[in-house]
Amino acid sequence: MSISGWFILALALSLANFPFVTNRFFGIIPLRQGKGFLVYMVELVLVYLILAVTAYALESRMGTVFVQGWQFYAITVSLIAVFSFPGFVCRFLL
């Protein structure tokens, strides 16, 4: 795997756990009532979009961008859910 592939994996692992680190929305905006389930889901969607744009930019820089089907997106969403598990455990179960 190339350096950009390892970079995307490391970025995905760190960004997937980011919503569980702080009580602020995306680490910037303080919330009065704390975070609810919907806020965590919005943050994970934003993290996924940031990762997708970064991966697309790196792939287009290397050459031809491959067309992806729905299976690719289903797998990558599942990977984000799996990568966010350590942050979830530290936040809610410990």
Image (spheres, grey):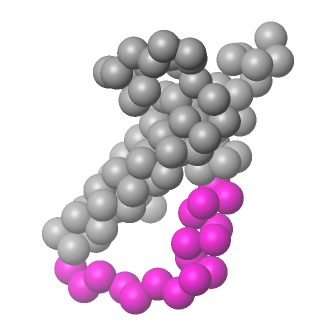
Q: Report the residue at 41% width, 41% height from top.
A: 11
Q: Quick one: which residue is furthest to the front in this view? A: 32
Quadrant for the C terminus, please. top right
Closer-to-camera residue (12/24): 24
Residue 41 at x, y percent in the picture: 58, 44
Position above or below: 50 against 36: below
Residue 86 visible in the picture: no
Q: Quadrant of residue 93?
A: top right
Q: Report the residue at 40% width, 29% height from top.
A: 26
Position above or below: 53 against 67: above
Horizontal arrangement in the rendering, residue 32 relative to residue 72 (left or right): left
Q: Which residues are magenta?
A: 63-79
Q: Report the residue at 44% width, 46% height from top.
A: 47
Quadrant for the N terminus, please. bottom left
Residue 42 at x, y percent in the picture: 51, 45
Residue 43 at x, y percent in the picture: 48, 40
Closer-to-camera residue (6/31): 31
Q: Quadrant of residue 20?
A: top right
Q: Is residue 73 magenta?
A: yes
Q: Is residue 77 magenta?
A: yes
Residue 25 at x, y percent in the picture: 43, 26
Residue 54 visible in the picture: yes
Q: Quick one: which residue is furthest to the right in this view? A: 93
Closer-to-camera residue (79/2): 79
